[in-house]
Amino acid sequence: MGKSTPQYSLINASYDLGVTYLFDFKKKDFIYKEGKPVEVTGIEALKVWICKIIYTEKHRFRVYEGLEIDYGVTLEEFIVGKKYPTPFVQSEIKREITEALLLHPRISYLSDWSFTRDENSLEIAFTVNLVDAQSFTIQEVIWYGRDIEGRL
């Protein structure tokens, strides 16, 4: 997949995530060390932000109403109880995630997508390419069988 350019960015280009806390999305809990939540900054904070976007179904949670952007992604309609052709599902998941993540000014484009799906799960992996030429891989299981309500 080639470079994608967002049509707009609602996040200030100098935006820094500052300090955030590591979160275990499988256990649905923060990660603690010596009784305190583990703080992360920089690229590690960006990874947490990316996973929060991926695991948040757009328009589901009232806490995100009224924001400048539609927080999260719409994935359920493509993977829960539907029998869409695999290429269509993959294309829509890529589109949803790409549109959401390219709102961040540090993210230039996403590449190297892969999908692994079986009866009980859907795993995605992709490379996040930053504007400063750094990159990293995100690999997440975004669906476990019927446990879609357990997502953030």
Image (tube, grey):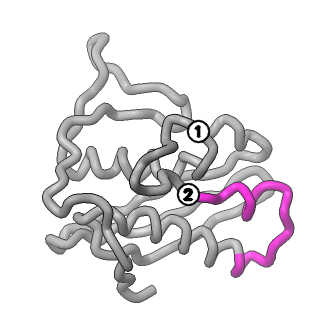
Q: Quadrant of residue 3?
A: bottom left
Amino acid identity at mark 1: Phe
Amino acid identity at mark 2: Val
Q: Residue at x 56, y 37 (%)?
A: 62
| Picture layout, residue 54 above or below residue 61 | below
Which element carries disc 2, helix, strand or loop? Answer: loop
Q: Residue at x 84, y 63 (%)?
A: 82
Quadrant into which the N terminus falls: bottom left
In the rendered image, residue 149 lying in the magenta stretch gets the answer no
- Residue 34 pos. (x, y %): 27, 13
Q: CA distance from mark 2 to mark 1?
A: 12 Å
| Picture layout, residue 38 above or below residue 118 | above
> Which of the two residues, 17 or 26, is positioned nearer the viewer here?
17
- Residue 91 pos. (x, y %): 62, 78
Q: Hey, which residue is sitting farthest top in the picture? A: 35
Q: Which residue is mark 1?
A: 61
Q: Are marks 2 and 1 in contact (CB under 8 Å)?
A: no
Q: What segment is highlighted magenta in the picture?
A: 74-88
